[in-house]
Structures are given as C-alpha cells and as structure tokens.
Amino acid sequence: QVHLVESGGGLVQAGGSLRLSCAASSSIFSIYAMGWYRQAPGKQRELVAGITRGGSTNYEDSVKGRFTISRDIAKNTVWLQMNSLKPEDTAVYYCNTRPELYSWGQGTQVTVSS
C-alpha cells in the first residue's frame, strides 16, 4: 500500500502564496499521472491540477495562471505552488494518482482570509 503525505498548508491572506508538498512512500510518480485535489466544506472533492507521466500539466479553470504543479520523481515528491490565493481556494488539499488508486492521506488545510 502506498502512503501519501501532504504538507505545507496554513492560514494566509488573500493574495498570498503557499507551496504544498506531497511525499509518496513508493516510487509511483514515474508510473502514474498525479493530481492535486481539494475539498471545501460542503463540497465534493475536485481535481485542481494534474501532471502526466510525461510531465504535461493541466489545471482547473479557476486556478489557471495561479497554481503550478511540479514533481521530482527521484524524491517521490509532487508540489503545488499556489500564488494569488483567494478566499475561495480555502479547502483541504490532497494528492493522489489520476485516477485515484490509493487511499487518501490526511490532506493539508489551506485557509485564505479576505
């Protein structure tokens, strides 16, 4: 079983930045596409950024131009750089493969104040 551990969340003012990290317990990033997902209170979990095995990236419309997903295969780590944060970005952020193959980690809380 692969374990995914997210970190880097916190409380930030609107317009600020955060960098989230996701560490995997096994070398999966060269095998699977990866994604960052988020779940806001009362809403379903949604995919906000993805990176393919080949390194191509895609983003949900609301975060395009503000978020950047990247990875280091050797370090089994994927990051999400989040700039120009907005209150509507407030959510618990998770990483997983695309599609989701593994159990969800605990996530990391991102709270953006207005």
Image: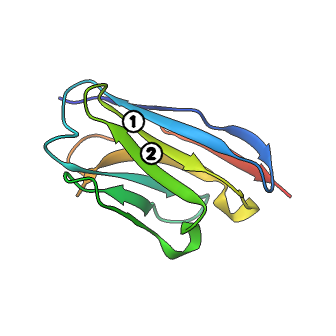
Side of 65 relative to 76 (left or right): right
Residue located 22% across and 30% down the image? 2
Q: Are marks 2 and 1 in contact (CB under 8 Å)?
A: yes
Residue 40 visible, this orientation: yes
Quick one: quadrant of the N terminus?
top left
Side of 103 relative to 17 (left or right): left
Side of 102 relative to 90 (left or right): left
Pick the front one: 44 or 87: 87
Tell me the colour scheme of the image: rainbow
Circle 1 SS class: loop
From this view, report whether residue 53 is shown above or below residue 79.
below
Earlier residue among tags 2 and 1: 2
The amino acid marked with disc number 1 is Gly
At which x and y percent is residue 17? 70, 46
Residue farthest along the right direction in this orientation: 114
Residue 106 visible, this orientation: no
From this view, report whether residue 68 is shown above or below residue 64.
above
Quick one: quadrant of the C terminus?
bottom right
Residue farthest along the bottom direction in this orientation: 61
Q: How many marks?
A: 2
Circle 2 SS class: strand
How crowded is the residue under tag 2: few (<14 C-alpha within 10 Å), some, or many (20+)? many
Between marks 2 and 1, how big is the CA–CA gap? 7 Å
How crowded is the residue under tag 1: few (<14 C-alpha within 10 Å), some, or many (20+)? some
The amino acid marked with disc number 2 is Tyr
Residue located 20% across and 54% down the image? 54
Residue located 45% across and 40% down the image? 79
Residue 94 numbered tag: 2
At which x and y percent is residue 8? 58, 33
Pick the front one: 93 or 8: 8
At which x and y percent is residue 70? 40, 46
Residue 105 numbered tag: 1
